[in-house]
Image: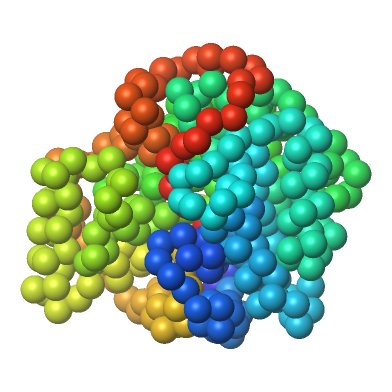
Amino acid sequence: MKYNLLGKTGLNVSSLSFGASSLGGVFHAVQKADAIRAVHVALDCGINYFDVAPAYGGTRSETVLGEALKDIPRDKYFLSTKVGKYTSSGNYGDDTLDYSAARIRASLDESSRRLGTDHFDIIHLHDFEYQNRRYTEWALDEGLATLHTLKKEGRIGAVSCGIYPMDLWERIFQDYEIDVALIHNHYCLNDTRLLELLPLAQKKNIGIINGSPFASSLLTERGPAEWHPASTEDRMLFRATAEFCRAQGTNISKLALQFASRHPDIPTTLFSSASAVSVKRNFQWSEEKMDDSLLAKVMELLSPVFNKQWDYSGDEHSGVSRTAGGVSKHPGHESLERIPVG
C-alpha cells in the first residue's frame, strides 16, 4: 500500500481508503460479523483511512464501524464522518437535511458515541446540493462556519465537503476555505472532470478524496441500482462494456479501480464493501499492472457517456428540475433519494 499526504491536513493516508456505507446494509443485507471482518481485512491490507456517515443505514454503518475499530489503537487509523444529512429510519432515501450549528454539534456527539472516539480527523458537510439546491446557502453559511469553529476548538482536524456538482465545487474552491474535498463520480473510466479542479486544489493545498471509483456501480458486472438516473440506453452501453471486458478475460471493476486509484495528484480513492473477499481483491487489483491497451478500448466504448452529468440529487424522482440557485436559506426537511459515497 502506498501513502500520500492529504493536502494541508498533514494526514498520510493510504492510496485506497474504506467507505463504510456498505456496513449498514445500504446496498443489500449484511451480517455484522462479515462487515467487521471486512474492516479488519482492510486494516491488514494497509488501509488507514475510514469514512462513514450517520445517514448510512440509519446510523447502522457508524455503529458497526465503531464495533470493528473498538480494539484498534486510535493512532492506527484516520476517521471521518459527515454532517447535515440524517436517516433515522434506516430506509434508503428516507432522509432529512439540517445544516444548523446545533444539529451539527449534536450529530458529532452522537457519532462520537457510536464510533467510540472524541476526535474526528475530517468532517464532511454532506449532500447540500439536493432538493433543487434549496439547502446550499444554508450549508455554505452556517454549516461551514460551524465546522471551522469546531476545528478551532480541536474537536475536528479538517473541514471538508462531500457533494457532486462540478459548478458547486468550482465555487467552493474559489470562494471558501476548506482543507479536504470528497468528490464522487468525477474520476473514473467514464468521467474525469475532477482533473479540472486539480490546479486550484494544488494552489490552495486542498486534499482530494476520490469517491465512487466504480461510478455508482455503473462500472461493475452487476450494474447500477434501479434508482440510478442512467437511461436504459446508457445502461445497455455500460453492460456491453462490462461484457467486452469479460470477453478479454477480466472484470470491468478491476480496470475501473486501477484507473481511479493511480493518478499521482489524487492522494486516495475511496471504495465501499462489506465483504472481506472484495476488500482483499480490490487491494490485489490495485497492486497489479493496468492493461493500458484494454483501457484505451474501454474508454473508446464509453465515449458516448464520457463526462455525462448524472442527476444524483433525487430531483428526477420529485419532478423538480435542478437549477443553480438555492430556494431558501433554512427550508423545512424533505424526504429525498440519496446516493451513498463512502
Asked if residue 324 is positioned above or below residue 116 in the image, the reply reads above
Q: Residue furthest front?
A: 89
Taking depth in this image into account, of 288 and 66 the one nearest to the observer is 66
Give the side of residue 107 with respect to residue 313, left or right: right
Q: Which residue is painted at 35% across and 45% down in the image?
A: 192
Residue 252 drawn at (x, y percent): 23, 66
Q: Which residue is painted at 30% across and 46% down in the image?
A: 228
Q: Residue furthest right?
A: 153
Quarter of image, res 153: top right
Residue 171 drawn at (x, y percent): 55, 24
Q: Which residue is painted at 56% across and 83% down in the image?
A: 33
Taking depth in this image into account, of 206 and 45 the one nearest to the observer is 45
Give the side of residue 331 with respect to residue 338, left or right: right
Residue 250 drawn at (x, y percent): 20, 76
Taking depth in this image into account, of 128 and 259 the one nearest to the observer is 128
Give the side of residue 94 with respect to residue 291, left or right: right
Q: From this viewpoint, is residue 274 visible?
A: yes
Asked if residue 335 is positioned above or below residue 115 in the image, the reply reads above
Number of numbered discs: 0
Q: Which residue is painted at 54% across and 42% down in the image?
A: 95
Taking depth in this image into account, of 203 and 11 the one nearest to the observer is 11
Quarter of image, res 3: bottom right
Asked if residue 134 is positioned above or below residue 177 in the image, the reply reads above
